[in-house]
Structure formats: structure tokens, C-alpha cells
Image (spheres, grey):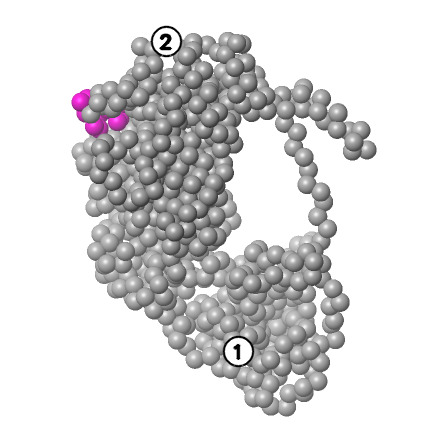
Amino acid sequence: MPEYNKLNSGIAQKLCAVVGERRFQLGEQVKPDYSHDEMPIYGKFMPEAVCLPETTEEVAQIMRICSENKIPVTVRGTGTGLVGGCVPIYGGIVLSTEKMNKIISYDMNNMVVHIQPGVLLCDLAADALAHGLMYPPDPGEKTATVGGNVSTNAGGMRAVKYGVTRDYVLAMTVVLPSGEIMKLGKTVCKTSSGYSLLHLMVGSEGTLGIITELTLKLIPKPIKDVSLILPFKDIATAIASVPAIKLANLDPQSIEFMERDIVDSSAAFTGNAVFPTVVNGKEAGAYILVTLVGDSEAELTMKMDRLGEVAEQVGAYDVLVVWTDSLKKDVWAARSAFLTVIEAETRLLDEMDVVVPVDRIAEFLVYTHDEAVKQGVYVRSFGHAGDGNLHIYCCSNELEEDEFKRRVKALMDKCYAKCTEFEGQVSGEHSIGHAKKEYLRQSVGDTAYSLMGAIKNVFDPDGILNPGKVCHDI
Amino acid sequence: MLNILVCVKQVPDVNLVKMDPVTGSLIRQGVPAILNPLDANALEAAVRVKEQYGGTVTAITMGPDMAEEALRECLAAGADRAVLLSDRAFANADTLATSYVIVSAAKQLGDFDMIFCGKESLDGATGQMGSQLAERFDASQISSLSIITEVDLENKTVTGERELEKGVELAQATLPCLFTVEKTHYRPRIPNLKSWKASRTAQITRFSSKTIPGLDPEQIGDPGSPTKVPRTYPPQVGQAGQIIDEGSADKSIEKLLALVPELV
């Protein structure tokens, strides 16, 4: 079991000397936001100090000091995580990448961008578009840092066509817990050159090393796109349509599902009632939102025709065409607001980010709803129907917190067991943090869990980097 | 059967427009053109009246060829017919000249019982077109309409609510009547695939200065526009503030106090 030291004034002075007074917070100066992420139900843990480095060399110096003194270091982007991944549960320092927010350069010939890890996803997306390129990963939380996205291997709405963040990371600079600087990967698309430490680093949640620079692959911006809303009677019929949509050879950029209650909440909260609730005289109970891309209007029209045929076969009430830019903005803003809406209307909140095979989504949601009713909590859900990644929020405004936690644990125990039974994954993109460790162990088994722990030990024998997370048991 | 006209305008998406700080002119290059948002509300009002009481909806606009896109959007969202008034001679028209051309062309299309406009356009935002058109159509007018509550086809009257600062006013007018529409109740619908597809290939009726009979060249375009704009300029923007964050309240206050003599 690692034994950590407290930050004494001597160590604090050394850290402060690295980043300077303006980028160093100590003790009471530390802002409370650094004690939690966006899921405060998992507890608040204040760091002893916060460092805001701007360069790889500063990160390396910080790590050398912390390594010598066995001070825990928890890396943090903008703190938009949902599993306590960036929360310093064993104290020590938070190393925030907020100031490492530069888009360094574009290599247009190779279609790559070099960035620092603290660049916000929304900023990278907009900047790439301004260069005529697209950064395909599109997680819902646009103010997350790209470094955070890499650390959680975030997926998002376009994963069904383009894959996840991992697929766009070509190279990175990493600072190891010892302070050693290491470059992983190259600006090429193929490699058959030993174990991929690069890919080990992706999704490792800041437990193996600190990412200080990233080289990301970009693609040409699609020429034309259209989103289509398919309203259905209920979630079961909506989800049942997804395999047919995928089989129609449309290569959709995204296939999202949403239930009526979250759409209603979003409309009431944002005043943006863009999803029609009554379609051709029928009440919609759920929606599928599909985005198609193509080189021309003619190509898109052909794809839309095919989708129209599928929609009729699978019982959609209609196919609504979101063609104009302003309408697209409204529709996707409503979709992106779901989590904010849930947070705003809920006093107690916990979440699951499971992935199940696409044809088991409806069954899993029905199971979850039924179990939630038994536990006296209510559920809001939406997610990526195209890849089976579900965001299920367990909510209560009535229960006491301890009682809520007890009931949600009982609910989640059952749901994660069902997810394992369905050959699913504990997390699609929100990761493990410290909140889902036990479910990870149950899902992957003791052998795999121990191997993960052994890998962690190789990189970080003193266990100072983001301790107590993913597979690190103390 | 009601004969309904909706007057629309294609405007630059002002959220994306920047102003040249030297010349004061709008930089429109690369800025997408959109259907004026309040005109989309007006169209929705018209289409709902049609669906409830029967009739046909004609969308009309004056603009360059690219304004066809705004008309196709109207066709997708329920208009039955679209009319584009396009001619270089119409260029630089103010609201007086524009309303003259629109009414002159509309007279070729029949007698309209109801005419809908958005309350104002996103770019010019004069809010003058509605009243000028009402005058030229010799129609009654309900401005700032929030919702139409009844159309009495027998007595040729219409009743609607106007949202005013101090409350809601119930207004009744005889047909023909022109409405300038608020966005409150008429969220534009999302077209379905069938109507969207039809809109992409629909025939659009076109008029030029030569095909509108009796058009007075002195009342169109630049010569017909008494409004002259001597200069446009961006509003003055205050100096950006400075955030003082020295890591602690005490240090920040100390820094602030040090800056005060420089500022006064």
C-alpha cells in the first residue's frame, strides 16, 4: 500500500517556483471547484494545492518534485467528468491543464493538428472547420478538454461512422510519474511496431502518465449533411428500427435516441421546443435522430429516400428533414442540453454509461426502468443508439442522500450484472474513475483486473498518479 | 377558400456577420443566407390558418436568384406556391420601393384575403414593410400578432391577439387583413421528407421589372427609394475589462489599489 506524504511548505515552495505564484493555489486559496467533477454524488475531495502548468517541461518538473516526495498528483481538464476521475481522493495536488490550451499547428499535407491537452473540444472543432477539416469525435460535453477526451477515450455522437477518440490519436508527448518525458506514436497511419504504449495511454484516465501534447488526425469536412428526426410510438419501436437503419447502407454519421420525457424537460428548460411532440396526429413517445453526410444534395436525397423506406417499414410516424443550418443548430442544441437539463431539474443524481449490443438496447432500458420503479427512483435516458452506448441517469428529488445512494447501488448492481449478461461494457465513454471500479472488476474478471493493476504498477510503482482510480486499489 | 400571401426575405445570418471597422459595411462574404426567422413564424401562422380554414398559401420575396432557397424552405414548410421578384433594377430598394414592387406583383396573382409578414427583418430591422404593404394593399392591419384566434369566413373578419407591453389585446379586423407576426405561438414546423423533396424541384414563379405590368421605373430600386444611408458604422464598444486574479483576495485587492491612481 503506498504511503503518501502531505504537502509541506518546502515542497509547496518548490512547486510554486515551477509555475509561478499566479498559477499556483495552496490551501485555502484552492478553489472549491477542484474538489469535484460534474457528478458530486461521488464525494468532494479538496486537493492540498493546484498547479496550472503551461509547458511539458513545467509538468516534468512538477512530477519530479512529487515523485521524490511521494505526493499524489491528479490531472484535471475542465472537470466535466462523471465518475470522479479527476477528483483527488487521496489529496496531494491537482495538475490542471487549463493553461495548456494552445492549438500549436496544423500539418495540412498530412491532415493532422498538434495541440496542447487543455484545448477545449468546441475550440478544436471550430478551428478545424475553419481550416476546412473536421475533428470527427463529437462527445456531448463540448467544453471538455481534448486531453480529457483522450484520457477517457470519449466517443460521442459521430462514433457510429468515424469511431472514437482513440482512432484519431496519432502521437503524444507524455510525462511519466518520474518526470521523464516520452514521445509516443508518429504522424503516420500505420504501425506494427511493438506494444502500443500510445493506445495504452488512451483511456488510461491519467493513471499512467500525463499527456502534454497531442497529434490528432483530421478528415476533410463533409460537403453536405442533413439530420432527420424519426418519431416513434415508444422507445422499444424506436430502438428496434436501428439495425434496419444500419443495414440500409446509409453510413450514417450518427444515430441518437431520446425518450419523450427528456425531450419535454429539455423544451421546458431551454424554451427550445424543437422536437414535435404530436406528429400526424399521434403522440411521439421516443425519437431517433439520424445524421447523413454526402458529397451532394442528390446523394443525400437518395440516402433520405432509402431512410424513408426503412422508416415506413419500422413504424416511424414520419421522417422530418432538418435541412437548414438554423434548424440543425436548434435540434442539436436541444440534444446537447440533455445532461444540463437533468442536472438542473434533479437534486440527487447518479449515472450509468453502459454499452450493450444494439439489438439489446430496448430490453436493457425496459429492465432498467422496471428496476428503478422497484427502487423508487426515476430514470432519464438518452444516448447513442447506433453503437449501443446508453446514458442512463438515476434521479430523485425526494429521497435523503444516503437512502438514494443505497437504492441506486441496488439498482446499479442489477443493471451492471444485466449488462455483463448481455456481453456489454461498463462504460462506453465516461470511464471508470473511482466510482465504477467494482463494476469494472466484475465485468472484466479478476485476471484482467489484476493485469491492469500490474500495468499501472510498471508505469507508476509509487502509485502517485491519480491514485485509487480505474484499477488502482489502495 | 382563403387566398393567403406570406412576404418573406432572405437575410444574412447576422449572428455570423461582421462589420468592416474602416468602411462600416457588412462583411457578407462566406456568411450563409437564411430565411428571416420571424418570416418563418409568419409562414407557420399562414399555414395553420390554411389547415384550419382551407385555402392556398403563396410565399413571395424580392431578391437575387439565391433567394430561391428561402422560397423552397417556405414550400417545404407548407406554402403551395412561391414567387420570386428578381431584377437588377430592383437593387438598392428601401422599404417603400420594395413594398411597391411586391404589391404590384401580387396584384398579378389574385386578390389576397390575408397577408402575413414577420414583425421585422433580422438585417434591416426597420419593421416598416408590414404597414407599407397594408397601406398599398388597402388592407386592415393587425401588427405584433401573437396568435389568430378566429377567422370568420362568412362575415370576412379575423380575430387575433396582440402581445403588448402592458398585456394582451384582442383585435378584430375585416378582411383583407395584413398581420405582422411575433414568434410567440408560431414555431416553424420541421418539414417531412415528402414535402421537403417536393420543395426542391417545385417550379418557382418569377417576375422581373419587365413582366410586372405598369411598373413605374421611378418607384423601384434606387430611384424609388427616398431612404439614403450616408454612413454605417459599428457601435462603440467599451474597453475590455481587466481581470485581476493574484491568487488570493488580499493580493488581488492590493493589485487593484495599486492600479487605481493610474485609472483616475
Residue B147 visible, this angle: no
Local packing at callout 2 (Cα closer than 10 Å; few below 14, some 14-19, many 20+) is: few
Using the numbered discs, state the Cα–Cα distance from disc 2 to disc 1 in whole angstroms.
Answer: 78 Å
Q: Who is closer to the viewer here, A468 or A272?
A: A468
Q: Is residue A311 above or below residue A374?
A: below
Q: Residue at x 18, y 36 (%)?
A: A423
Q: Is residue B226 above or below residue A27?
A: below
Q: Residue at x 24, y 54 (%)?
A: A246
Residue B31 x %, y %: 54, 61
Q: Amino acid at mark 2?
A: Glu
Magenta stretch contains residue A468? no
Which residue bears the numbered disc 2? A3
Residue A335 x %, y %: 42, 47
Residue B99 x %, y %: 65, 77
Return the chain for callout 2. A
Tell me which segment is drawn in magenta. A438-447
Q: Secondary structure at mark 1?
A: strand
Looking at the image, how many numbered discs can be counted on the residues?
A: 2
Q: Amino acid at mark 1?
A: Leu
Q: Residue at x 50, y 27 (%)?
A: A53
Which residue bears the numbered disc 1? B84
